[in-house]
Image (cartoon, helix red, strand yellow):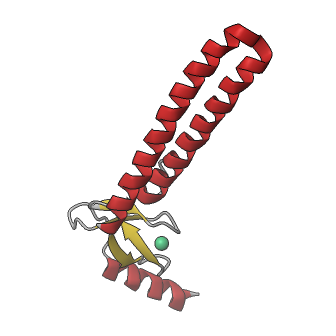
Amino acid sequence: MFFKSSKINSFRLWGLLLTMFGMGLMVLGTAGIVFWGQSGKIVAAIGLVIGLVAMLGSLAVYFWAGMLSTSAVQLECPECHKLTKMLGKTDRCMFCKTILTLDPLQATITADELEANQSTNLTAK
Ligand SMILES: [Zn+2]
């Protein structure tokens, strides 16, 4: 699931997971006081610290994703014809997960060939 997504989408997913993880740890840590009393305070302290670090990490991931998406190339996906963004030379379409590349050496099929294939498929049907 992580690997079959565009880079921007997976960054957002990781940010969300880190936030959930951090909040979960803080809640669990605080719950430790209720369950174990005095000795639970140590658990709570550790949970709060790790939770806070995870939240800060998620903030950094979100910030990074925001910075990256401003420099992302916007293009129309040749497969589903929606406007998508790609990072680097190779990325997946945000909508249909088709692998897109700007590098002609890595491309197995060019946009023109795809267009030609689609039109021949349409006429064949
Ligand atoms: Zn697409």
> Where is residue 87 drawn, in percent x and y?
33, 61
Residue ID at (65%, 34%) = 24
Which corner quadrant of the image does residue 42 belong to? Answer: top right
> Where is residue 36 drawn, in percent x and y?
76, 11
- Give the answer, above or below, for where 98 lies relative to 76: above
- Give the answer, above or below, for where 65 lies relative to 46: below
Q: Can residue 25 be spotted in the picture?
A: yes
Residue nearest the observer in this picture, 64 or 122: 64
- Give the answer, above or below, for where 21 lies relative to 124: above
Residue nearest the observer in this picture, 53 or 121: 53
Residue ID at (36%, 77%) = 75
Which corner quadrant of the image does residue 90 belong to? Answer: bottom left
Horizontal relation, residue 72 to residue 7: left or right = left
> Where is residue 88 drawn, in percent x and y?
28, 60
Q: Residue furthest top?
A: 39
Q: Give the tally of numbered discs.
A: 0
> Where is residue 94 drawn, in percent x and y?
48, 66
Q: Can residue 1 be spotted in the picture?
A: no
Q: For the C terminus, give its image quadrant.
A: bottom right
Residue ID at (33%, 60%) = 67
